[in-house]
Image (spheres, rainbow, N blue to C red):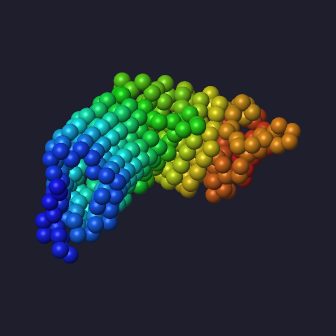
Amino acid sequence: MAKLIDCELKPYEYEYPEGTEEIKTKHHFNDTFLNRVSFPKTLKSIGKDAFRGCTLLSEINLPYGLEYIGQGAFAGCKSLKYVDIPPSVKCISLYAFAECENLKSVDFSEGIISICDCAFKGCTSLHSVVIPGSVVDIGLDAFDSINYVKLNEGIKEIHCCAFSNSNIKHLKIPASTNIKLPWYEYDSTVFDIKSLRTFEVDDNNACFSSKDGILYNKNKSVVVRMPIQSPINNLVLPQTIKTISREAFKGCKNLRTIRLPKGLSKLENFAFCDCTSLTEIHIEVEKVESICFYCRDVDDNGIQIYIDESYFSKETTDVCTLFVPPGTRWAYRHHPVFGQFKNIEIEF
């Protein structure tokens, strides 16, 4: 039988007896007097919301043998400061430690496989984490407040926005890592980190590469993402570039000029959204009709419908000058996307 230690309307400790294998859903849900809990060595699973809202719970010692931490199991445990994840744990579920606002340190043992969506969302005191190589995937919004993350070799998938709202400045992507892709080919939102300055990709990564801190696909035919805080003001894209992916330059407020190569053949939505310092775009493509634009709809005649500000914000098309090859200005002026630019000049 479980032991209650001094539980009379004041902080108390709860001890689970040896032989307990599962803590059921909401077992201590919103128990605002529980400040410490002792787990048995036999424990294998902690259920959904088991300790959610236990605002005084300041210490937990997860035993070796524990395999599963359920959805929201320790969410809102605002006094919790340190958590050590034993190597037996394979999955940390959705919101498992969400809103633990005083959680300062989490030590992941080698062996964990999955860190699910929002697992540590809202943990505003958690500033650095090391992700072991055993992790197969990191979920949506898993971490949103950290300053530093080390991704160990072995990690295979990162879901979009895994580190959104974090303060990471440099991100090194190991050889093993790919990106969990949604409906479009490259998901730059996985790297939508407002403080990020540089990417560095392991040379042996089969999917990605980097140059000057910018993220490309392996053969540099696709611009995946320029870091939002990249210090680069004037950018000349490699001549190998054929595609500028969705939101590739979104929010890059230090970018002033960019040169797009002759071989550019595809521009995806919101590629240059919120590039508020952009004053010049130099495009070398001689046949503007050769550029494919992602569009959301077609009219009754099968003609593509383009969304205003879908590629360039109005602020950009109003003040930025588009430089085009000689003999192409008429075509660019009458193009449904490039024709939005008020200033189109010939580049000699």
Viewer-closest of 51 and 8? 8
Furthest toward the bottom, the residue is 9
Viewer-closest of 331 and 26? 26
Task: Tell me residue 334's x, y (percent).
Answer: 80, 43
Residue 54: quarter of image: bottom left
Q: Is residue 319 left or right of residue 206?
A: right
Q: Is residue 297 depicted above or below 99 in this figure?
A: above
Task: Tell me residue 246's x, y (percent).
Answer: 57, 42
Residue 268: quarter of image: top right
Q: Can the viewer see residue 165 in this picture?
A: yes
Viewer-closest of 96 and 319? 96
Task: Tell me residue 187's x, y (percent).
Answer: 52, 39
How many numbered discs?
0
Q: Can the viewer see residue 345 in this picture?
A: no
Q: Which quarter of the image is occupied by the C terminus?
A: top right
Furthest toward the left, the residue is 5
Q: Is residue 259 left or right of residue 206?
A: right
Q: Is residue 57 left or right of residue 173?
A: left
Furthest toward the right, the residue is 301
Residue at horizontal 62%, vertical 31%?
264
Q: Which quarter of the image is occupied by the N terminus?
A: bottom left
Q: Is residue 33 depicted above or below 314 in this figure?
A: below
Residue at horizontal 58%, vertical 37%?
183
Residue at horizontal 42%, vertical 24%?
206
Task: Tell me residue 82's x, y (percent).
Answer: 20, 55
Residue at horizontal 20%, vertical 39%?
65
